[in-house]
Image (cartoon, rainbow, N blue to C red):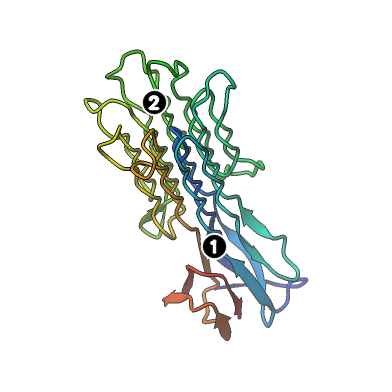
Amino acid sequence: MQILASPHAGAILANYLVVGGGGGGSWYGGGGAGGYRTASDLIITIGTTYTITIGGGGAGSVYSGQGSNGSNSSIAGTGITTITSTGGGTGAKNNAAAGDGGSVGGGSGGGAGTAGLGNTPSTSPSQGNNGGAGATDFATFTKGGGGGGASAAGQASPATTLAGAAGAGGAGSTYNGVVYAGGGGGWNDSVTAGAAAGGSGGGGAGGVTTTIAPVAGTANRGGGGGGGGTEPGVNDGGAGGSGVVFIDAGITATSTTGSPTLVGTSYKFTGSGTITF
């Protein structure tokens, strides 16, 4: 615990991690991871109540459609600038003629024609990375790009042959020994190439033709959902994983709501609530 001198009397510095909800996988493109923000500079005032919001993961696509972005996670309260991690962008729907791209978000959704931009809105350090572009030849090579993760962009899919692989999701980042905010893998029409992996940190793997269903992002890890394909009900896009918030002020809180888990002096919120020190 670090007690601050005047003009911050009665205040302490806290460590935090805020991860947004992951984006849902779309018709080919993998969902982007939720935004990932961590630092050790949050000035906590004793006696002030802070509101913790946990963003839900975005829905995966239904046959031939596009999923939805994840929701934002945040820490808010009197006297601080709200810390917001943006929900991950959904993957791109495969429509090369229209140039559909993955939606922007913390870690952006993977592409079909183009991919969306991560770290949107921009933060420093970056809260997430771009998605990878997918195949543009809809008639022959239907392969999605991977969603962006906290520490790496989603992989692109060149798809120059039918056997070529879809793009894997971008890797997440580690906090307290656990990896969070990995991107979802893109959908693949090639059994030979197999499923595109989700990024480490809860990203879901993409689906493959009618044989392998896409995987949802892991709950409370902010992972993007895997990209879906062409069979309704069989490989609709995977849902994004919900977000998470950690806050550690070096002391035990006087009150909480939302039932956070306490390890040492670190509070882990997997559902929205409040905390007062």
Residue farthest to the right, as pictured: 7
Q: Which amino acid does label 2 sit on?
A: Lys
Q: Is mark 2 on a helix, strand or loop?
A: loop
Q: Residue at x 39, y 46 (%)?
A: 203
Foreground residue, 46 or 132? 132
> Along the line of sight, which residue is nearer the eye, 134 or 34?
134
Of badges 1 and 2, the one in the foreground is: 2
Q: Residue furthest front?
A: 232
Quadrant including the N terminus: bottom right
Percent x, y of residue 136: 47, 18
Q: Residue 210 has which mark?
A: none
x and y percent of residue 238 in the render? Answer: 41, 46
Q: Is residue 144 above or below residue 216?
A: above
Residue plotted at (60% across, 38% down):
104
Give whichever of 135, 265 is nearer the camera: 135
Q: Identity of the amino acid at label 1? A: Tyr
The residue carrying mark 1 is 16
Q: Earlier in the sequence, mark 1 or mark 2?
A: 1
| Whether residue 59 is situated above or below residue 148 in the rendered picture | below
Q: Is residue 202 visible?
A: yes
Q: How far apart are marks 1 and 2 (CA)?
A: 37 Å
- In percent of width and height, residue 41 lies at 62, 60
